[in-house]
Image (cartoon, rainbow, N blue to C red):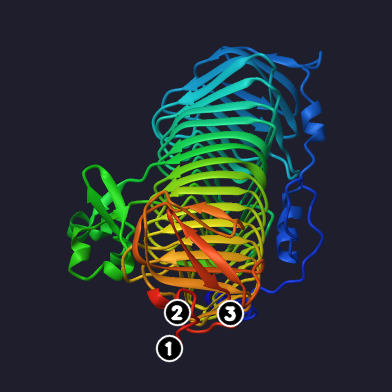
Amino acid sequence: MKRFLALLLIVCLALTAALSVACNYTETPVSPTDTGETKIEYTTAEQSVVDAAAYDFTALKADTAIPEDATNVEASSNKVSLTGGNYVLSGEYTKGITITAEKDVHIYLNGATITNAGKKALTIEKGDTENDVSIIITIVDGTVNEISNTESKNAFDSAIPVFINGSGTLNVSSTGNNAIKVDSALKVVDATINVANSAKNAISAYSFAAKDCTINVLSAAKDGIHAEMDDAVTAWTVDDGYVVLLNVNYTANVQGDGVQTDTFVYIDGGTYDITTTASFVSYTEWAANPDEYDLEADDFKYAKSGDAFNKKSSKTITSSTVKSLYAMEQSAKGIKVGEIDYDLDGTEYTVENGNYYIIIASGTFNINSDDDAVHANSGNITISGGTFTIATLDDGICADLLAKIGGGAITVNKCFEGIEGGYVEITGGTISLTCTDDGINAASDDFNNEYIKISGGTITVNTEGDGIDSNGSATISGGTVYVFGPTSGGNSALDSESTVNITGGTVVAVSKEAMDRITSNVPYVSATNVSVSSGATLSINGMFGVELPKAYSGATIIVCSENMTANTAYTLNYGTKSVSLTAKTGSTGGMGGGMGGFGGGPKFR
């Protein structure tokens, strides 16, 4: 019966997900939350995530002074059973501390060093009570405290909710397991937490929320911040499995994900310096003993040159060439939202239908990741503000469903694909993408219903693949878009399975190949067989001036702009050369013309 009900649930969820896809993510917008940088209206689904992220840290911030009736725990003690109250830990505890809470407990770390070789250093258990209990840990201002252990146990381990406050410093390390592990909620305000090393996750909890604090993860074999809910959860919920970061200064150097969650990530303010380093395995090693790795043949996408790895386009990989490639052994993404997984009678299920979101309202992000920099499994990414500097071997921003950008400054200096989603919407912001494959890509299993919609912002794309590429449709109705496509054949600056429809804004596109399936309802000019040097300035009648990032020989140039007038002559300047062109409208098919007829109208194919 349990298995039947579980299968019935999966079928229902799958049908719901299919209906959601069919609806193409059209939701009624609601008023945006006041984050200062928000440039877009939140949909009802996004707002539900933002509301779930709300937590009032006011009371936790204020409760930091050591009360006069607090009990000092002697340094010689290592087994402490507390029924509730206030306790102060100072000095060295070499055999660890175990706290059994029967009521709410408040601990003050006042220059404490807690160690325990081979065992948990700080253990927090629930006592013999049916009541909900939690613990507040105050890191006293001006003090440095340490929790560490070796072998196979967590250094800091709690079975009950943990609230950390105070403006002191806590140093945590574990050479055998997680540095901090909380089987419930963990909330941090004001404090500085340093994880020197962790054999697994640096900080792991069912949910994690932090504000106005500093978290430094110097080394972790897995994730920096990890939020994974209890295995008993079998349906979508916003109660656990999330990470909320409000004005947090976060540094992470990890071999897993910088931030990884089950349900959602919400970030507003702060600085985030995230470096992820992946471990790679060769196809030959995997094929010799595949049971050692959680991999499939499709995961082998990376070519090795010296000590460097580069991702190959799936179009270039064959059953023969894959044998020389490598795969990442585990996820090494910058910021990632995953999915709710659970086990029933030995079978693992995934809850694919839910409001999985990464929502970033503001902040400064420096992400250098071997895997995707920002990634949503079965979910969505919404960026309304912030400054991003990204370098990655894979995708800059990747959402299985909707990738939406409404503000901020996003610079991807190195990537495979810049922005990828089943659906991509850009309404604002300043975006610069340098890619070895596609710049902005809409791809999914949605049977050509994918789309790219650009209605605002300033976007510059420099690619070796397609500049803007949709497996469905692409519409540009506003903003300024510069696309510098490949210098050789096979790809183009603008590409769509159905059509690229330009109805507003300004679009400047350059590539070796002609650009098919384009309809421009605003005036445009075009030229083919153009040769121009790298660094040359491309402009037209002073309306814009953009520097070419690479040289082109025999290229196609298209300029579409709502600021031009049909049947009017314009001068296109490229480097030291210029040509007079007449603007037209209503073009379809492949844009371009012969060298002798610059701007002479469209080719119909």
Could you say which disc has been placed on residue 18 in the image?
A: 3
Q: According to the image, label 2 marks what residue? A: 516
Q: Nearer the viewer, residue 464 or 293?
A: 464
Q: Nearer the viewer, residue 370 or 546?
A: 546
Q: In the displayed structure, would residue 399 be above or below residue 84? A: below
Q: Amino acid at mark 2?
A: Asp
Q: Is residue 603 visible?
A: yes
Q: If you read the primary sequence from the N terminus, does the residue marked by circle 1 or circle 2 appear first?
A: 2
Q: Residues within 10 Å of mark 2 (few under 14, many from 20)?
A: many
Q: Amino acid at mark 3?
A: Ala
Q: Is residue 229 visible?
A: no
Question: Under tag 2, what secondary structure?
Answer: loop
Q: Residues within 10 Å of mark 3 (few under 14, many from 20)?
A: few
State the residue at coordinates (45%, 79%): 516
CA distance separating discs 3 and 1 = 35 Å
Q: If you read the primary sequence from the N terminus, does the residue marked by circle 3 or circle 1 appear first?
A: 3
CA distance separating discs 1 and 2 = 8 Å
Q: Nearer the viewer, residue 543 or 273?
A: 543
Q: Residue 229 location in percent, x, y?
A: 59, 52
Q: According to the image, label 1 marks what residue? A: 605
Q: Residue 557 location in percent, x, y?
A: 45, 67
